[in-house]
Amino acid sequence: MKKKLIRITTVPLSLKILLKGQHRFMSQFYKVLGVSSRGSDLQEVATKEGIAVAEVEMTRTIAPLKDLVSLWNFYKLCKKEQPFIVHSHTPKAGIIGMLGAKLAGVPHRLHTVAGMPLLEATGFKRTLLNIVEKLTYSCATKVYPNSKGLEKIIKAEKFAKTEKLKVLANGSSNGIDTSYFNNEHFTSSQNEALKQQLGIEKNAIVFIFVGRLVGDKGINELVAAFKELSVDSQQATSNKQHPKLLLVGPLETALDPLLEETQQEILNNKNIISVGWQHDVRPYFAISNVLVFPSYREGFPNVVLQAGAMALPSIVTNINGCNEIIEEGKNGWIIPVKDKDAILKAMQHCLVNEASFNIIKSNARKMVETRYEQQVVWNALLEEYEGLV
């Protein structure tokens, strides 16, 4: 009889996207139950992954009373289901999942760290988040930072004992399916049709960002840098490259809104194209030349893996995860955090150094294939599960 495995995330989109395909793979060996807040995405996970799901409402913000209700509900679920393993992802699901599972007597409590919002917090909020992080790790029997950089941060902050920590494979929560993220799925005629639809000239150099349009993703700096690049290109009449900035992702105004001038520039600059959230980001990678990902903090960013698999070099900030996937001058460029001028300089470099750009571009896909193929990550996690006593 298969042992029961609970995978818990704060919102169902994380179960659906962050761990896509992993549930179906693990269900060959375990009876998998996906747990998250309610939503249509949760039922989609059940259908596409072929697993059972359960709702436990959780908030992404600090909400003590609601969090206690979430903890009680997850505790009751664990007592009912009697899982062999509870494996949590995302910060709020981490504390709810690990504390609830410990109180319910679940023997194996695993938490994957894929980013730390607390790194950008200050004052009382930072102190509170530090306490929650330490409590999450103390309740876990094993903690998996999904990058070596995150592991170093956890050790430096003394959030967990070293013996609890392990980075699986070469990092990443789910690896990358390079057969799916592959330019060969898109013909030149399809690419040209999408460019025409978006108003992008045939010979345009397209810088792409994929992710949430919020402050800590570096969007304010990116848009400010591109504004200067766009003006420079218009003034240099001999420049026929017509750079464009393609933004793929939802505008979020609740937790970390963009500056008003950034929002106005996105609306008014004809060289900035914002297409919102997209179910399939591959067509947009296929018409682009460079990923620009100036995030302030990450765990192990899937979007940089996706871009690499689609043969795009990346401009990334010098933060954990990003600086492990990208090697300076080999498959992209690494710049300082929160530095508009560095973003501008890197984009200008891509426009004027065609020979070196093409060499770096040629390395992008093979460096992802050899280090982060999805099956490698799945097998490493399965080996962890199988090694539990």
Image (cartoon, helix red, strand yellow):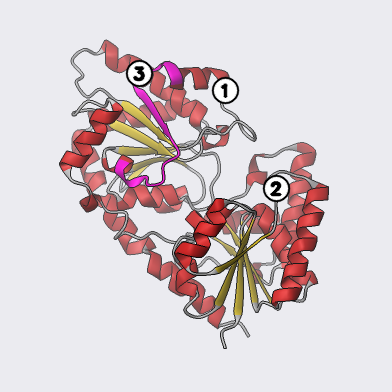
Mark 1–mark 3 contact, CB under 8 Å?
Answer: no
Q: Where is residue 8 shown, x and y percent of the image?
A: 62, 62
> How many C-alpha atoms fall within 10 Å of the one at disc 1: few (<14), some, or many (≥20)?
few
Q: What element carries label 1?
A: loop
Mark 3–mark 2 contact, CB under 8 Å?
Answer: no
Residue position for label 1: 259
Q: 328 or 223: nearer the eye?
A: 223
Q: Where is residue 325 shown, x and y percent of the image?
A: 41, 52
Residue position for label 2: 59
- Do we see residue 117 in this rendering? yes
Residue type at the position of mark 1: Leu
Residue type at the position of mark 3: Lys
> How many C-alpha atoms fall within 10 Å of the one at disc 2: few (<14), some, or many (≥20)?
some
Which residues are drawn in magenta? 267-283
Nearer to us: label 1 or label 3: 3
Q: Where is residue 332 shown, x and y percent of the image?
A: 34, 43
Of callouts 3 and 2, the N-terminal one: 2
Nearer to us: label 2 or label 1: 2
Q: How far apart are marks 3 and 2 (CA)?
A: 37 Å
Residue position for label 3: 270
